[in-house]
Image: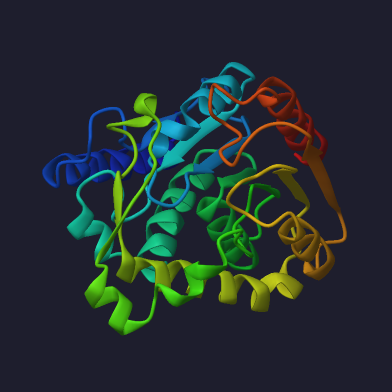
């Protein structure tokens, strides 16, 4: 390893200590794995809203086996407690992601960003600033199927309904928040608004994916992102089956998705 690589690893170790000190849930910590090949391409993985790096674990393992360096980042306020979550927002989510990008970029010949849901939007917001080799946006947030979500950021509703109980699958308990602070929804909407404004500045190649029966995101979202993005190279892949979190083990088209991601990285690295 070069001194540059050691420096990056030391910074990651410092981040690990910080995560341990704030009580990040077991198996939900940020992870960083690098190949012996110093010319390896890197992939930064970013999880979704209220979730944790755990939802990107299987994808990360697959990419590492394919020969890529892999950093799975934990967004600020996630995988600790709802008080931390309530105090987080777009600025801190971007900051934690930039820190992760700087680390993996130092150890990789080129770097791709792969985000899911909120993580996809953060990837697209970060894109014009760091100019990655490519961006993969999985089920990117923009327009929501639940039209009432825009009203939850109102101050009166925050007071009356400070938390929203989530329908969490039993297998996800311990890896995702079971209730979410209403106040942080306004930050989620802020991300969507900033995303739309920044799309024309996007230059990196894009791979956009969404399931046609995604219960969370309006299927029009991926079309809007595709049409508004300034990238010259961009592609949409839609899945007839599958839900919102395409990386999870239960997704029927997961293996096809993973192959598509690897193909995209190889084509642009």
Residue placed furthest toward the bottom: 155
Q: Residue at x 59, y 42 (%)?
A: 244
Residue 172, horizontal then vertical, whole percent:
37, 30
Residue 241, horizontal then vertical, whole percent:
72, 31
Q: Residue at x 48, y 27 (%)?
A: 34
Q: Residue at x 79, y 70 (%)?
A: 228
Q: Nearer the viewer, residue 160 or 41?
A: 160
Q: How many marks?
A: 0
Asked if residue 73 lies left or right of residue 141, the reply is left
The structure's colour scheme is rainbow
Q: Is residue 174 above or below residue 162?
A: above
Asked if residue 153 lies left or right of residue 197, the reply is left
Q: Quadrant of the N terminus?
A: top left
Residue 155, horizontal then vertical, whole percent:
31, 83
Q: Nearer the viewer, residue 231 or 175?
A: 175
Q: Is residue 133 above or below residue 6?
A: below
Q: Quadrant of the C terminus?
A: top right
Residue placed furthest toward the top: 65
Q: Is residue 32 above or below residue 177?
A: above
Asked if residue 35 lies left or right of residue 110, the reply is left
Tell me the quarter of the picture where residue 39 sits: top right
Residue 15, horizontal then vertical, whole percent:
26, 45
Residue placed furthest toward the right: 232
């Amino acid at each position: 390893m070069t001194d540059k690589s050691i420096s990056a690893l030391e910074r990651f170790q410092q981040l690990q200590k910080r995560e341990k000190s704030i009580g990040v849930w077991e198996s939900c910590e940020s992870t960083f794995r690098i190949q012996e090949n110093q010319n390896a391409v890197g992939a930064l993985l970013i999880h979704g809203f209220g979730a944790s790096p755990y939802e990107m674990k299987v994808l990360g393992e697959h990419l590492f086996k394919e020969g890529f360096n892999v950093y799975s980042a934990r967004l600020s306020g996630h995988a600790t407690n709802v008080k931390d979550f309530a105090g987080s927002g777009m600025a801190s989510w971007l900051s934690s992601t930039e820190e992760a990008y700087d680390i993996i970029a130092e150890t990789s010949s080129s770097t791709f960003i792969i985000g899911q849901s909120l993580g996809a939007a953060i990837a697209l917001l970060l894109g014009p600033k760091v100019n990655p080799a490519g961006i993969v946006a999985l089920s990117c947030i923009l327009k929501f199927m639940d039209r009432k979500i825009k009203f939850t950021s109102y101050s009166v509703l925050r007071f009356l309904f400070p938390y929203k109980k989530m329908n969490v699958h039993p297998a996800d308990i311990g890896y995702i928040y079971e209730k979410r602070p209403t106040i942080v929804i306004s930050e989620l909407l802020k991300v969507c608004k900033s995303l739309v404004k920044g799309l024309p500045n996007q230059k990196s190649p894009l791979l956009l994916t969404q399931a046609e029966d995604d219960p969370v995101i309006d299927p029009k979202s991926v079309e809007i992102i595709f049409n508004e993005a300034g990238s010259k190279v961009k592609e949409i892949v839609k899945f007839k089956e599958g839900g919102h979190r395409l990386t999870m083990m239960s997704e029927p088209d997961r293996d096809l998705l993973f192959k598509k991601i690897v193909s995209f990285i190889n084509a642009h690295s």
